[in-house]
Amino acid sequence: MLKKISDNNKGFTLVELMVVIVIIAVVAGLTMGEINSTSHKLKSAAQTLQAKMQQAKLLAVKENCNVFVDFDLDGGGVIDSFYTLWRDGDNSNTYSTSELVEKVSLPNDISFGAVAKADGGPDKSASGTSSIPSTTIISFSGDSIRFSPQGTGSNGWAYLHAPNKDSAGTYAVGSNNVGRIQNRHWVTNGDNWR
């Protein structure tokens, strides 16, 4: 037996479809604004550095050699706007181009360093043990992190901030001598690392 289709089931009206499209456009616009924000780029850069440090640690164990995350590749004392991962396959503690694993550039408006204390930046290191001098960018000895085949690492922090937007805060990504890698955030005008 055939049922008669009711006149009330005609589908969506043009007005209903337009309302849904407008709602989707507003949500997409808000999402894109957050993704392109300096705060999001800073957080993403810190998470990427943390992931790359973890990758270096795992590679050191897997390849049974030292692996470095280097912030001053040429050793000139100037921190680069990028960092490199390289494996020390011959245990020479020196870098050759054949040992380069990866080069990672920071986003254009993000750099190594911290928001100045006078502008609401951190008043102590990410480990909480000492104050941060205004010149501190990388606290790892030799401006690089060495991960050993046993998974141990250098002790220190790499600080990231957005020089043109202090309100984004400061991130610190660090490692301790047993190879524990962590990521902390100092909210501008805050009172502690999170």
Image (cartoon, grey):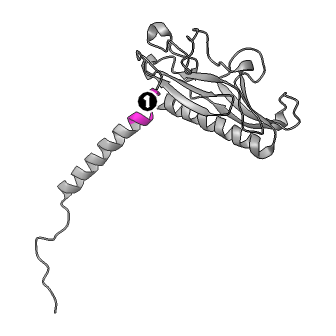
Coordinates of residue 145 in the picture (x, y in percent) = 71, 27
Q: Quadrant of the N terminus?
A: bottom left
Residue ID at (18%, 54%)? 15
Task: Examine the rendered structure and indicate whether residue 63 appears above or below residue 3.
Answer: above
Residue 57 to residue 108: above or below: below
Local crowd size for mark 1, using a 10 Å CA cut-off: few (<14), some (14–19), many (≥20)? few
Q: Is residue 110 left or right of residue 1?
A: right
Residue 137, position in %: x, y? 62, 17
Q: Does residue 153 appear to the left or right of 119 in the view shown? A: right
Magenta segment main secondary structure: helix
Q: Position of residue 141 (x, y in %)?
A: 72, 19
Residue pushed farthest bottom? 1
How many marks on residues?
Answer: 1
Q: Which residue is mark 1?
A: 37
* Nearest to the observer: residue 164 or residue 93: 93
Is residue 6 or residue 70 the one in the foreground? 70
Residue type for callout 1 = Ser
> In the rendered image of this protein, does residue 147 appear above or below residue 26?
above
Classify 88 as above or below 118: below
| Residue at the extreme top of the image, as rendered | 118
Q: Is residue 8 rendered magenta in the image? A: no
- The span shown in magenta is 33-39
- Percent x, y for residue 166? 45, 17
35 falls in the magenta region = yes
Q: Residue at x 39, y 34 (%)?
A: 33
Q: Secondary structure at mark 1?
A: loop
